[in-house]
Amino acid sequence: MKPATFQSHFAAALFDVRPSFELASQPAFAVYRNTVMKGCIDALEANYPSVARLVGSDWFRAAAAVHVAARPPHDGRMLCYGADFAGFLAGFEPAADLPYLPGVARLDHSWTQAHTAADAHAIDGAWLATLSPEALGTLRIAPHPAARWHWFPDAPIFTIWERNRNASDSTEELDWHGEGALLTRPRDAVTWRGASLGDCAFLDACADGKPLGDAAVAAVTAQADCDIADLLAGLLRAGALVVAPSAERAS
Amino acid sequence: MDCPLTAGLGLKPEHYDAARACTARGLWFEVHPENYMVAGGPRLRWLEAVRAAHPVALHGVSLSLAGDAPPDEDHLARFAALVRRIEPALVSEHLAWSTYDGRYFPDLLPFPRSDEALHRIAENIERTQAALGRRIAVENPSHYLHIDGHDWDEIDFLRELVRRTGCGLLLDVNNVHVSARNLGYEAGAYIDRFPGKDVLEIHLAGHSCDPVLGEALLIDSHDAPVAPEVWALYRRLIGRIGARPTLVERDGNVPAFDELLAERDVAAAELCAAEMAISNANGLPRRPKPMRAPARATESFR
């Protein structure tokens, strides 16, 4: 048998309960089947700890097995596996009663992205205070490579995620309104806080390469009562901003 | 001053601080490079901190050398970047495949050792060594299945890969024990035939019985101490070929660092005993053979 034919049949038999591949009839074939499935499910459970805590390990592992069969990994780095798990959960019929689950998964994924993103020096308020008003208006700042932000219009996803990420047993009633989240990593540890609609619009504009003045307009457009000085001070304190790489080269 | 690698340990994240602080002579650590192929962040800083105190080996699990395709270019580039960054004492991979048609299966899968497979694997090893700019060691896998269509015996196959590519070998003694039991051959005879001069590294690990088939099927589970039969095979091997950097692997039921270190110390003592026995037999002082880690200006070897 050609190597490609052998590997094609072997790979198919790993996920096929009634394979025609002769080797799969040996009881020991289950070792490979189990190892591959367990490796994928363990990776998903490690990458989505808040989702797993919310639904319990048994439910999580059963859902993960469905995901693995439909979308196996494409990268040897298992910490990257499951980038589309939130999308999978959104269309997973048994999760239909848990509409907040995909958002929680999105924040778990953002945590992994923040954890592994490139290092960069976050700018702070003291540095910004040294700039003239003219320089400020044309300054291009960018989100820190580790910064991830989301606005969830319908549910307190950030609060739900944070309680589970912290393994909190809080029974405090949830205030059922839209919420945003900002995760970043100024140095080693991933940090997070709530984010306003203005924060998210501001960061979107910065990510699009807009100058500071335009980003401020975007924030006020998204959220009329937003105080730009407070917003900027908050993002600087969070370590969520850097000088835009192209601006840095130009200066 | 650098120090020859003696016995090392697989590095677990929960042991980073203890690993860095440990001063055992000749101690080194091994990691899966896949866990450190990231753009930035604390993982690289932790690994660099351990590397500043000890030699580190990179043991890849996903290159798929026996896959019927060249290694993924992006993966190789990330691997090469980590090699440049960490300057590892040893780099190794497996005689197995784990990717097919773009999909990755997190396991080390078997194949018929055909002439065609030999040609492809030799090409893949050459590409890897060219990308990393160094020699790699290729590990003998654990076997569970009786596969038809082998043109080559495993040891002859590995020997031929060494001849064609200049690669070295990593002999996993637990894999030999597990495979010999599962496929019904004599582990001692395999150990005795293995080409000693090409062995750059030895692995030791624990195994377990299959939950369904029991003793009829041993699993290379890395979740228990090294078994007495594996220690016996190890003594037999190093009694013949001399000391080599030896890694004690543990991936499940990971105990406290000191407990793992004690198991590693047993391997280090066996290496000393083997060297002394060989010196005495030859009647001549014998220089230890282990690889020396490249010295770095920023680190202090103990």
Image (tube, coloured by chain):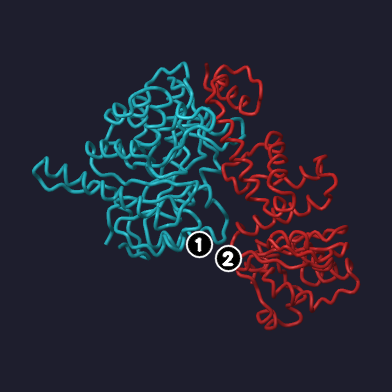
Chain colours: A red, B cyan
Residue at x 41%, y 62% (from the top left corner) = B20
Look at the picture and state if A67 lies above or below B85: above
The three-letter amino acid code for the residue at tag 1 is Arg
Image quadrant where residue B207 sits: top left
Image quadrant where residue B184 sits: top left
Q: Name the residue carrying label 1.
A: B45
Look at the picture and state if B148 lies above or below A171: above
Residue at x 51%, y 43% (from the top left corner) = B76
Q: Name the residue carrying label 2.
A: A188
Image quadrant where residue A113 sits: bottom right
Q: Position of residue A71 (x, y in %)?
A: 69, 37
Quadrant location, the N terminus of chain B: bottom left
Q: Position of residue B189 (x, y in %)?
A: 29, 26
Q: Chain of mark 2?
A: A
Q: Are marks 1 and 2 in contact (CB under 8 Å)?
A: yes
Please name whichever residue, B9 or A239, is drawn nearer the observer in this view of the structure: B9
